[in-house]
């Protein structure tokens, strides 16, 4: 039963609604709608000029309508008179194929048709930096190994607990917060849920972290590698498939307590990893997190190879315990909806094609990776990943050809803009050639 937004506005004292959608680059776009107008908006949607955002549209396209999903309603913890709503995109009476949330809903429906419910949790890492974005916000946070630094965590107590208190009140079941492996970096964890709920919460979390940080005079960034010498920000995803209350990835007789179905799902991700990378690691900067040299803390925490392991953090996929696996490839720039959709599409293909993930590797991939001659490497840059996505029949079939075509077109424009950019490094290394 869907929430009635007109009565919710009265009950919660909402004066405005933010009708929000996420475009292909993960940017959140919204209209601020007075509560008196929500009754009409919930049926017809809020209208936008689609071409003005990253959706691969032109001014010749008709109005784009963002139709809010009433069940996604969140009262802004830092501005309680506003209700946030995630929206699906419609145009000319049809769902927009390249809408990220629409796409995730399509893939989730395909999984459901085969009898599966995808549940995921995401580990959002971010930096608190100065408002100009140039340095971390805490000059005293300078330890060489800053992971779990108690004092640095407590110096940002007011920001972290404001966000955590909000998650508690929203019923997300947050369970831990810490200072991460880079100076200025934090991670906050809340309970996993079905893929669409997690994607909506992931979007909202980014919005909330940025808004609360700003209130405290800082800036929260999810940029994958904001500082070359420090560990980057990942967005590890924990994945399991369910049928009702039964976790289909759990099998006491399976290797590491994981079922044959889970290994097929992993096989699907391993098979499509280079193309998935274009979605889960979507920016030029993303490739400075993966394939990175050792950071000052001693490790990058990001994978370099398309390999899987048990409870070992040097591979793309880690099986930490029975019943789930962790996909360590995605980063902070990943579109929350497309991240889930890409995992679901690659995994579903793995199940349908009964893909073999190959042999589990238990070695330290950072130090002994060279001993595995046939380990597939991850793309070295965005262009390689985009080319892999271009060739991926799995993701085209899973996410839809229109979504892939639009995504590739926009990301290639992004890559071309980067290629034309003259860097200081080029000047220094080439001036005297
Ligand atoms: Mg982490």
Image (spheres, helix red, strand yellow):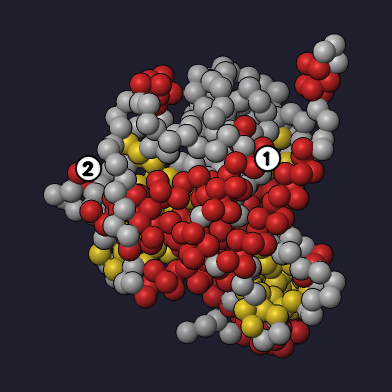
User: In which quadrant will I find the C terminus?
Assistant: top right
Query: Residue 256 appears at what percent x and percent y?
Result: 22, 42
Residue depicted at x 72% and y 64%:
55
Residue 4 is situated, as x and y percent measured from the top left of the image, at 58, 85
Give whichever of discs 1 and 2 has the lower sequence position.
Answer: 2
Q: Nearer the viewer, residue 243 or 133?
A: 243
Q: Position of residue 77 (x, y in %)?
A: 64, 60
Question: Label 2 CB, ligand 1: below 8 Å?
Answer: no
19 sits to left or right of 371: right
Q: Which residue is mark 2?
A: 256
Q: Local crowd at mark 1 within 10 Å, few (<14), some, or many (≥20)? A: some
**Which residue occupies the extreme top position in the image?**
432
For residue 284, which numbered disc appears in the image?
1
Q: Specify whether tag 1 is near ligand 1 (CB below 8 Å).
A: no
Q: Is any part of residue 426 visible from this angle?
A: yes
Q: Is residue 364 above or below residue 188?
A: above
Q: Is disc 2 surrounded by few (<14), some (14 to 19) or many (20+) residues within 10 Å? A: some
Between residues 136 and 163, which one lies in front from this camera angle? 136
Image position of 11 (left or right of 216): left
Q: Is residue 150 visible?
A: no
Q: Who's the residue at 50% across and 72% down the image?
A: 106
At a point 58% along the width and 37% down the height, the residue shown is: 233
Mark pair 1, 2: CA separation: 36 Å
Instruction: Report x, y in % for residue 89.
Output: 66, 74
As displayed, is residue 228 above or below residue 202?
A: above
Query: Which residue: 72% across, 55% down?
Result: 410
What is the number of the mark on residue 341? none
Helix or strand or loop: what does disc 2 sit on?
A: helix
């Amino acid at each position: 039963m869907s929430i009635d937004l007109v009565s919710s506005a009265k009950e919660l004292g909402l004066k405005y609604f933010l009708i929000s959608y996420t475009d292909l680059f993960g940017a959140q776009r919204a209209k601020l709608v007075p509560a008196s107008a929500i009754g009409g908006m919930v049926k017809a949607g809020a209208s936008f000029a689609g071409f003005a955002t990253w959706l691969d549209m032109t001014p010749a396209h008709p109005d784009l309508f963002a139709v809010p999903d009433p069940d996604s309603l969140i009262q802004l913890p830092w501005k309680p008179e506003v209700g946030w709503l995630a929206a699906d995109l419609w145009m000319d009476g049809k769902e927009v194929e390249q809408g990220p949330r629409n796409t995730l809903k399509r893939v989730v429906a395909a999984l459901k048709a085969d009898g599966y419910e995808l549940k995921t949790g995401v580990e959002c890492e971010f930096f608190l930096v100065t408002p100009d974005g140039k340095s971390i916000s805490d000059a005293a946070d300078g330890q060489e190994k800053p992971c779990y630094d108690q004092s640095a965590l407590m110096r940002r107590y007011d920001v972290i607990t404001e966000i955590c208190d909000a998650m508690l009140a929203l019923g997300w079941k947050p369970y831990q917060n810490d200072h991460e492996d880079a100076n200025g970096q934090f991670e906050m964890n809340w309970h996993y849920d079905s893929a669409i709920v997690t994607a909506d919460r992931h979007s909202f979390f980014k919005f909330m972290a940025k808004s609360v940080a700003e209130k405290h005079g800082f800036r929260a960034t999810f940029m994958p590698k904001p500082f070359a010498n420090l560990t980057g920000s990942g967005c590890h995803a924990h994945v399991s498939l369910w049928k009702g209350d039964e976790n289909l990835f759990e099998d006491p007789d399976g290797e590491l307590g994981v079922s044959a179905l889970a290994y097929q799902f992993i096989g699907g991700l391993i098979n499509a990893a280079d193309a998935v990378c274009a979605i889960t690691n979507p920016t030029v900067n993303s490739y400075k997190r993966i394939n990175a040299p050792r950071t000052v803390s001693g490790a990058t925490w990001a994978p370099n190879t398309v390999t899987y392991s048990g409870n070992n953090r040097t591979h793309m996929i880690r099986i930490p315990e029975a019943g789930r696996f962790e996909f360590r490839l995605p980063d902070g720039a990943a579109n929350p909806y497309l991240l889930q959709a890409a995992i679901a599409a690659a995994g579903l293909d793995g199940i349908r094609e009964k893909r073999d993930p190959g042999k589990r590797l238990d070695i330290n991939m950072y130090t002994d990776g060279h001993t595995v001659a046939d380990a597939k490497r991850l793309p070295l840059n965005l262009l390689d990943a985009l080319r892999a996505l271009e060739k991926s029949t799995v993701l085209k079939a899973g996410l839809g050809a229109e979504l892939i075509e639009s995504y590739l077109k926009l990301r290639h424009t992004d890559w071309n803009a980067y290629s034309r950019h003259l860097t200081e490094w080029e000047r220094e290394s080439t001036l005297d050639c």
